[in-house]
Image (tube, helix red, strand yellow):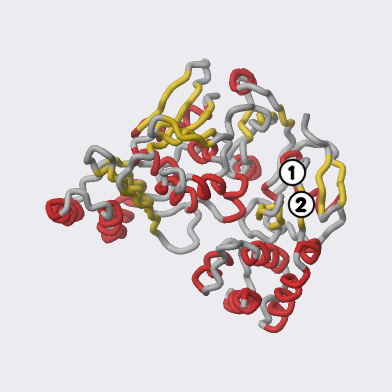
Amino acid sequence: MTPRSLTVNGSPVPLDEPDNRTLADVIRNDARLTGTHDPCEHGVCGACTVLMDGLPVRSCMVLAAQAAGHDITTVEGLSHLDGELKARLDAAFLSENAFQCGFCTPGMLVLAFWHLTQQDASVKEDGIRDLVANNLCRCTGYRSILRAVAKAAS
Amino acid sequence: MKLPPFVILRPSSVEAVIAELAAPGTALLAGGQGILFRLRTGETRAGRLVALSDVHGLDGVTQRDGFLEIGARVTLRHLAAVSAQMGAPLLADAARHVGNEAVRTLATIGGNLGHGVATCETLLALAAAGGRAHFTRADGERQEVAGDALLGLGAQVEEGGLVTGVGFPCTLLGASFAEFGPQGMWVPELAVAAAWRAGGSLAVALAVGEGGRRLFTDVDLHDARSDIASRLATDPLDTSLPAAWIAAIAAHHASLAKASRREGAS
């Protein structure tokens, strides 16, 4: 029997019909956590990236039903997982001006947070470049984001 | 780009999945990374999705008789993590090339193969390594699919069949995988898997062109073959040969891609 709820940042969120609702819909509309952006709605931009059981997923490409029974962490919940790392990332993004319009920022933060919690995380520029290439940013040209992630890693 | 309406069905056996797929307007839901995109773009129209989530026996990775036996629902992230330690580094390498970090968390090897496109990384690795896909046809008959026939899997899945697993040899002497093309392309312009099989044959699976609708095995590229032949003469058990093959093919990348585009246009 598939569970009819999921956990978002530690709080249970019940799942309702219909079946075509995405995880992004539930996070934004039911859990009212609007830090998760959903601009492209078809898995291209990565702005809706969240952690599902600690692993990155694009919440617009996950059906709510698929996420049933799983633990979801959004950008708002990262500080509960590792407040010190999240604070380092925030400070680095600010000091390096790693955002302009800010639409991609939640996805970039979630992805960078996940990367830096991996044992084999590459803190070299090539590794970070491969990581950041997962998500789209139309403002910064990526250089400042690369610098910010490298700074938070160090 | 909202998803169209559909209902999700959750049968608990392969037979029940096949029976559900027989109804018109039905599609498979494994990791969802392909089907949700196609539903949104209208490429696939389905009012019923048959989820594999409740089907037992599709999510294991075990070693048996020189093969890694992998269930269709195994995610590419898990595969990339475990298959290298279990004797199939080529498959791990191919899995790491699929999509991106977020896609690999949920995308499955069954879904990747079910696309039936040659540049599907796991399909190329399977073809080069001499592996096989375990397949149940729409009429219920079980098949082992290997070699160039792997490219037909996509069409058979659309007709209501199901990839249930993969058998990947863990006896390769050496192997290598690479993709080429302009940075940022969703589908590589050129993808190559090369495997130095036990028993002495060097096999190469190569897919060229947007969408990779062609699969070549044992590619005959004169210049590349000469280079490899000379190395082969020097050391017939040189396990770096697959990487050398790929480097040689990479040198032909531009002309191959051009020829493929020309063929596609004609």
**Image quadrant containing the N terminus of chain A:** top right
Q: Tell me residue B102's x, y (percent).
A: 62, 54
Q: In this view, does B39 lie above or below B239?
A: above
Q: Between A118 and B266, which is closer to the camera in this rendering? A: A118
Q: Residues within 10 Å of mark 1 (few under 14, many from 20)?
A: many
Q: Is residue B95 above or below residue B56?
A: below
**Image quadrant containing the C terminus of chain A:** bottom right
Residue A66 in which image quadrant: top right
Q: Between B202 and B222, which is closer to the camera in this rendering? A: B202
Circle 1 marks a residue in which chain? Answer: A
Q: Look at 79% across and 66% down and name the residue there.
A: A79
Q: Is residue B92 above or below residue B140?
A: below
Q: Between A101 and A74, which is closer to the camera in this rendering? A: A74
Assign a secondary structure to mark 2. strand
**Mark 1 and mark 2 residues within 8 Å of each other at the beta carbon:** yes
Residue B49 in which image quadrant: top right
From the viewer's perspective, tell me whether residue B78 is left or right of residue B215. Answer: right
Kind of residue at disc 2 = Ile
Which of the marked residues, 1 or 2, is nearer the chain's N terminus?
A: 1
Q: Residues within 10 Å of mark 2 (few under 14, many from 20)?
A: many
Q: Tell me residue B33's x, y (percent).
A: 61, 45
From the viewer's perspective, tell me whether residue B128 is left or right of residue A10. Answer: left
* Mark 1 and mark 2: Cα distance apart in space: 8 Å
Q: Tell me residue B162's x, y (percent).
A: 53, 27
Assign a secondary structure to mark 1. helix
Q: Look at 57% across and 65% down and name the residue there.
A: A121
Residue A67, disc: 1
Residue A72, disc: 2
Circle 2 marks a residue in which chain? Answer: A
Q: Are marks 1 and 2 on the same chain?
A: yes
> Residue B255, can we see it?
no
Kind of residue at disc 1 = Ala
